[in-house]
Every structure is written in structure tokens, then in C-alpha cells.
Image (cartoon, rainbow, N blue to C red):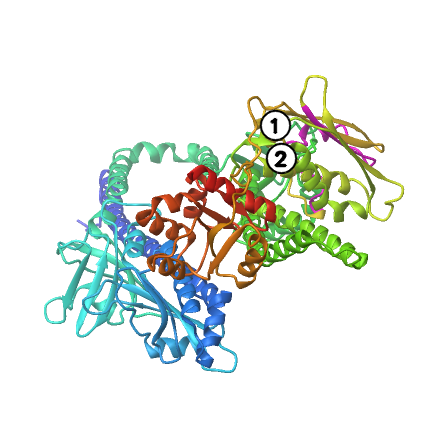
Amino acid sequence: MHGSSTSPPRRWLPPTAFALAAAGLVVAAVMMAVWMRAETRRRAGAELDAVAALKVEALQEWREDHLRNARYAALYPSIARAARASATGTLEPTLRAHVMEILGHLAARQGYASIALVGADGLPLAAWTRDGRPARPVDPRLLRAALASPDGAADALLAEAGEEPHLDVVAAARADGGPPCAVALRVDAAPLFEEVLDRWPVPTRTASAALVNAGGGEVRVFSSGRELPGGHAALLSASSQQELPAFKAAHGAMGIMQGVDPRGTPVLIAIRPVPRSDWKVCTEVALAEIDGAILRPVGVIAALALALLLAGAIMLALWWRQESARAAMETELREGRERLELALAGTHRVWDWDLTAGRLEIHRRWGLAALAPDAHHGTVSEVLARLVHPDDAAEVRARVEAHLRGETAVFESEHRIASPMAEVRWVFVRGRVSRRDAHGRALRFTGVSSDVTERRAIQARLELAQRMAGLGMLAAGVAHEINNPLASVSANLDFLAAEGIPPGGDPELAAALSEARDGADRVRDVVRGLRAFSKPGPEDRGPTDPGAELEAALRLAHNELRHRARVEARIADMPPVEAGGHELGQVFLNLLVNAAQAIPEGRADQNVVRVEAGTDAEGSAFVAIRDTGAGIPPEVLPRIFDPFYTTKASAGGSGLGLAIAHRIVSGAGGRIDVETQVGRGTCFRVTLPARRGPVDASAESGVGDATPPSRRRLLVVDDDALVLRALVRSLSRAYVVETASSAPEALARLDAGERFDAVLCDLMMPQVTGMELHAHIAARDPALASRMVFITGGAFSDAASRFLAETRNAWVEKPFEAARLEEAIARALAAAA
């Protein structure tokens, strides 16, 4: 017989192929599981590093805040004056105490452990500490770094032995012609460490963070408390714990690594340095939690592999017939998945642009009025021209075309959209090309959009609030600086007027005195307007004379009006109304400014603003302000009282004036009516109901009419020498006046046994305030304390505001009239009697 080679029976071919396929599938599944674990850990490391970067950024922002505070304190006028005085060796105790008070207020408000003005040697010149202990000298290295810094400031994040972590900040306060000084402050860092370490963008079960610092052969760890058995802080010794990631981080290790935490748990850790310090931020997650995230995908892969093995024979027979359907299905599933992923990113509308067909489909449309049926059909340029605001169309089109050419990985744009309505809507659009042909040409463009109009409005409100707060502080400071010299001028003018011009005297001298009195009154009105502007929050309502507030508003708006129109005012008697006086003045000022801005500049002789005020038939007060300006268009009129709605954005309009005026008038029970005609002008009419009940004529100063008694002994306490001399001149006709330039001097005279019938005292003084003097006198002589009268140029602290609101003693605002001041003293004496 001839031998012949025979091939394996055909029945073994499918099992052999199936075995090979099964082996290959198992190997592939194992490799995929290994790859998934590596990829999962890589992504987890990247997320940990991003979280560490956020924590470092939070620490840096915190440090920058305190650097700004230190630079601000160093530039404060009193501190700069103290620095110059120290350079010449003339730093007086009064100025030193004033600087300590300023530093103490800043430290109490910001929660500082200590703050000091130090000399070039680092020793404190004036200091405040939370625990009352003497302030420590400043580290010479830190002081030199601050003086050498371009912005004059430097800081150091420290954790010295036996102390909690803290931040030392030094800002140079340079003295002209002498050695430099500096403001040094210390901030407890432990609360900030706890807040930063516990803050996670997406918290997990085992995630934690720590701050580490090496020094003296040991490593100090400050943590969120989850990875240390002892709580928030621990010391790692070089002998027993040098293999811990935190120990390695403190000694220079950086980046992402694996290790074991102090509890013995395997972890993945990311390490980032804190700039300008020896500290490192470490974020970590247990490896078990990271690997646990892939258990379900691995199980799914195993199940799919088994299903594929069991259904292999069937799938092989059906493969050719189902290939085309499967390819189409995969394409649809991929596109659907991309839409879903983008939709789940916190957006509101999903869109799909078939570039080949020239059709844009928008799911959950823009939320505005419907566009024309063909608005979403056409070329890219045509569709964008219909949907995007004309002012933004060119930029948006350039970004879209760049992404379609493949120049950007993701398309992003924040722009206005075209709208048939007058309102402007902003959207944030994000997307990417989801399908290209073999030549790279874009076929399908998919993405999402969000309406961000409200977010931008909130951001604009915050920016406006910051500007208004800064302007209010400036107005308050200017008013305070003017008050004392103005009080002296007013009192001296009252004295000269009371003395009179001798018979046969120069009439020109009498006219000059009268004109000086008028000028001082005008400055006083401006100062009161500034105080009203700077007053925070809603004002307490009480009986208010609308006529007086209207006249004050006309004075403040004079400069705005005189370049645009003539002012014709007819102000008749009006009843008192229940409203805040300063708030009511703000309403009238807003309406007057609006009337002026409705008229172009340069034609003041051809335009007029008429102001008419009086009492209507129902007994209510009314104020009508009519202009000959451009008028209000009918489509704008329904929205003029909406907050932040303005038609003069290019001129700096905020859209708040009429909204605030409407709120104030409505809160007082009144109303604002509008009459307008385009091209002819507008009239705003404010109607306020008359106040019911008795009216206190002494609402402003807290005093009433009284007849001054015979000459009695009066002690006047004020730290301003000009004001003190002016008060002596004004009051010496009715009283025997003794003076004290400070509260301690007044207390010394009272302790020496001097007796006084009344005390006239400034409320705010640098060493001991008038409030504190009142408390000392009340403890020794309650009767004399009840006969104290206060004068104030403005209460700039919460304590002073509460004191004036609660005290029964009379008080008078600077600048004051001599008759009003004598009236307050006489009332205090009469009430005590």
C-alpha cells in the first residue's frame, strides 16, 4: 500500500478555531483589564494633581489677600505719617496710639494674631496683639525681602517648633528722607489649612489631603484628619517613617507616586509645592477605591466574552448579513453617546449640525421667540448670520471655521444671539466635529449651549456693588475730613455775627461776613449730602420734610443741570412724610439727573427742567419733575423700573437709578407716575402720603427748644484745637467755659475735684472716645453723665452708631450752629433738673 498523509477531519476545525479564539479572547480580556487599571490610576493621579493645584491656588489667593491688606495698611495716611515721624525721631504718643487703634481695628476685622508698625531694625514702634503680649520683632530676612521687593511686600508661611502654622507678612511703609518702616502682621494658618484640606471638588470616600513641612530633622504633617490616627497634625521622625510619601514630599519628592499612609493603607498620592515656602500639598486616594471603579467594567468584559464564545457559531453565520446594519448602528450609537456626554456636562440645549445636508437641529430651542422655518438651513455662514448677534457674528464664524478645519480640539464661544425681541441674551456654546470624511473634511458638528445671561448679570451686579462700596467709603472719608474745620469756621462766623458790626462800621465788612456765612452753609449741605451717600443699608424711616430733601437734591444736581437746561422750581408747603430723609433725597437726585441726561449738552437756553412741588387735593405731598428732552420710546417704557435695564450703557448707565427710586417710594407707601412723549419730554411725578401722628421737630440732633440758663460752668472736650477755640468763643457769652483736649485730661480735672454743670464732648477721639468718657463719668457721677452733650462729625463704627441710637443724651452733628448747640446744652441741663 502506498502511504498517504491525511488532513485532520473537518469536524475538528471549528473546535480548534473556537479554542484559539477563546484563548485569544481571554488574553485580550486580561490585557484590557491591566490596561484599564493602569489608565484608571493615571487618570486618578491627574485628578489628584489637579486637586492639589486647586489647593495651592487657594493658599496663594489667601496669601495675596493678606499681602494686599498689609500694603493697604502701609499706605494708610496715619501710618505713613507715623513712619515719617519715626524717621525723624518725633513719633508722638498720640500718633502712636492712633496707629495702634487703626492696626487693632484692621486686625480684629481680619482675625490677625498680631499687627505692628516696625522700624528698620524690625522692632515694633506701635503694635497690637490678640493675646495682649508684646509683639515679636520681625525676622530681618523677611523685612529685607519686603524692602527689596518691587511692590514693597513679602510674606513667609511658617511652622516653627511648638507653634501652630502661621503666615508672616511685611509691607514697607517708606519714610521720606529716613530709614524705612514697615507694617508686619501675623495670621493663624491652621483654620485656613483645615478649610483648604477638607475642600474637594468631587469628594470621595477615602480622599484626603495634607500639608507637609520639613525642619529640624522632623517632618510636620497638617492633614484633614482622615489619614492620621492622631487627628489633624503629626510629626514624622527620620528613623521610623522615612518611607512614607509625606516624609518624601517634605524632603523634595514631587509629582505622583504610590505608597503607604500612616495607617498602612496603600495609596496614590500627588505632591505639589507651595510657592515661596517650604510647604508641600499632598492629595491622596486609597488604591482600593481607584481599582474598585473598574470591577464592574471588568465583569462586563468577562460577560461579553462568554456571550461571544457561546454565540460565536450563530454570529459567524449572520455576520455578513448584519455587517452593514451593525456599522450604521455603531455610528448612531457613537453620535448619540457624544450628545449625551455633552448634555450631561451641566448644559441646557443639545444641537446637531449635519454639515453635508446643511441642516442644524436644536433640541430644546433657544427659549426665545421662534425664528423663520429656514433659519436652521443653509451654509455655515448663512446659519450663523441668522442665529448670532451681528456684533459677534464675525468672531463666532472665525472660531467655527477654524474648528471645522481641525485647528482647535474643541469649539467654545460665549456670545450674544440674534433675537426678534429687544432684550440681549448671552449663550455659552461648546462642541466638536463628531465625524469627518477620509480627507478630513467635517461632516457633522455636535455640541451643547447654555444660557448665561443671568450669570453675566450677577457678575455685573457684583462689580457695580464693589464700585459703589468704594465710592461710599471715599465719600465718608471726605465728609469726615471736612467736618472739623467746617465746624470751626461755622462757629467763628456765628460768633462774629453775634458780636455784630459797631455803629458806623464798614458795611462792606457786614456783607463779607454774610457771604462767608452763606458759603459755609453751602459747604455744610455738600457734606451732609456726602454723608447721606456713604450711609450703608436702608435708612430708618421717620418724619421727613420732602421740601428740604428736594432743595438739597437741586443743589447737588446743579452742576449736572446747568450745562443742559434752565431750572424753574416752584416748591410750596408740603406735609411731612414717613420715609428715610437721605433715601428720599436719593430719589429726587436720581430723577433730576435723569432729566438732565435726557437733554443734550450745549443748548441750556433752549431747554428747561421744571420742578413743581406741593400738596394735592388728597393731602399728599407731590413732586413733579418735567424735562424737555428726548422722551421715552413706547417699547422701552414698560421696563424703565426694571433693575439693571438701561438704554445708556455706552454712557456708563447702571440701570439702577429708577429701580432704586421706585423701591424707596413704594416702601414709603407712595407711587411714581410717568408721562412721556417722544421728542417732547418726560414728566415723573412722585406722590407720598402725609405722615400720621405728631412730628418731632428735633429729629436730626436729638434736642428740642429750651431756654439757656444763667452762666454755669461748662467743660468742653475735643481733640481739635480749632474746634475747641471756636466753641469757647461761641459759648462764653452764656457759660463759664473750661476746655480739655482729650478725655484723659477731662477725667484728671474731674478727679481733682473740679465741678461742672455740663460736659460738651466730641464723640470720636483718638485715645479715649467720648463714649468711653461717658462710661467713666457715669460710674463716678451719674448725674453729670446725664448732662453730657455730644458733638460728632459722623459715626464711622458700629459701636458709635448704636450709641447714638440708644443714648438719651443730646447730640449735635458738625458743622453746627451756635444757637442749636446752646439749645442742646440748655435742654440737657433742664432735663437733668
Q: In the rendered image, is residue 672 in sight? A: yes
Q: Quadrant of residue 298?
A: top left
Q: Earlier in the sequence, mark 1 or mark 2?
A: 1
Q: Which mark is residue 577?
A: 1
Q: Secondary structure at mark 1?
A: strand
State which quarter of the image contains the C terminus.
top left
Amino acid type, label 1: Val
Give 446 or 286, whichever is nearer the viewer.
286
In the image, 575: left or right of 465? right
Which residue lies at the image location 87% right of the left edge and 45% below the top edge? 603
Secondary structure mostly taken by the magenta-highlighted segment of the chain: loop
Magenta residue check for 340: no
The residue to which callout 2 is attached is 584
**Residue 68 at x, y = what percent?**
45, 63
Which residue lies at the image location 65% right of the left edge and 52% below the top edge? 494
Q: Which mark is residue 644?
A: none
Tell me the crowding category of disc 2: few under 14, some 14 to 19, or many 20 or more residues within 10 angstroms, Cα based: many
**Residue 571 at x, y = what percent?**
75, 32
Tell whether label 2 touches label 1 (CB within 8 Å).
Answer: yes
- State the extent of the magenta-drawn residues as a range: 621-650
Which residue lies at the image location 40% right of the left edge and 43% below the top edge? 786
Q: In the rendered image, is residue 357 in sight? A: no
**Residue 315 at x, y = what percent?**
34, 34
Q: Secondary structure at mark 2?
A: helix
